[in-house]
Amino acid sequence: QVQLVESGGGLVQTGGSLRLSCAASGRTSSTYPKAWFRQAPGKEREFVAAISGSGGSTYYADSMKGRVTISRDNAKNSVYLQMNRLEPEDTAVYYCAAARAPSATYYYTSVYDYWGQGTQVTVSA
């Protein structure tokens, strides 16, 4: 069983930065493709960024390109999301996800087998 635990969320002013972390348990999960999604109140969960098992490929939602960077450290079985120039519209619960196998449709929630409990990010105007 793989467990994912996010951290690093909080309250930040518009234009600020946050770095989210996701620690995974389970030795075999260290090379699983991973991703970040977010869900704002009253909205569906949406894709933010994804990274391949090796870290060699990264993918971003168009709305986040240029403002976020996803990275991973397989030795620590962790994935990170650096977010810059945050806006109030970025306020949401951010979730880490892991998939047992890679997929071309990495932006779909159904691709992912494991999810964290989420970390709240609030951006004040």
Image: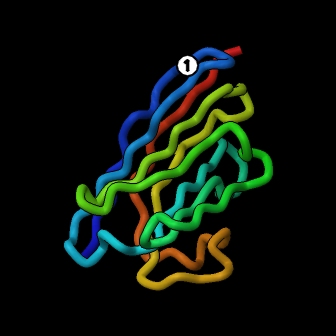
Report the residue that reaches farthest toward the front: 56
Classify 119 as above or below 12.
Answer: below
Label 1: few (<14), some (14–19) or many (≥20) C-alpha neighbours in 10 Å: some
Q: Residue at x 43, y 47 (%)?
A: 80
Considering the image in quadrants, where does the C terminus appear?
A: top right
Q: Quadrant of residue 41?
A: top right
Q: How many marks?
A: 1
Q: How is the image coloured?
A: rainbow
Q: Residue at x 43, y 72 (%)?
A: 53
Q: Quadrant of residue 61?
A: bottom right
Classify 98 as above or below 61.
Answer: below
Q: Residue at x 57, y 27 (%)?
A: 122
- Left/right of residue 54 with respect to residue 106 in the rendered view: left
Name the residue carrying label 1: 12
Question: Residue 91 location in percent, x, y?
Answer: 64, 33
The amino acid type of the residue labelled 1 equals Val
Foreground pick, 66 / 110: 66
Q: Residue at x 60, y 19 (%)?
A: 16
- Left/right of residue 39 with respect to residue 53 in the rendered view: right
Question: Residue 111 location in percent, x, y?
Answer: 57, 79
Classify 19 as above or below 118.
Answer: above
Considering the image in quadrants, where does the N terminus appear?
A: bottom left
Q: Quadrant of residue 107?
A: bottom right
Classify 61 as above or below 112.
Answer: above
Foreground pick, 90 / 50: 50
Foreground pick, 58 / 16: 58
Question: Residue 15 location in percent, x, y?
Answer: 67, 19
- SS of the residue at dot 1? strand
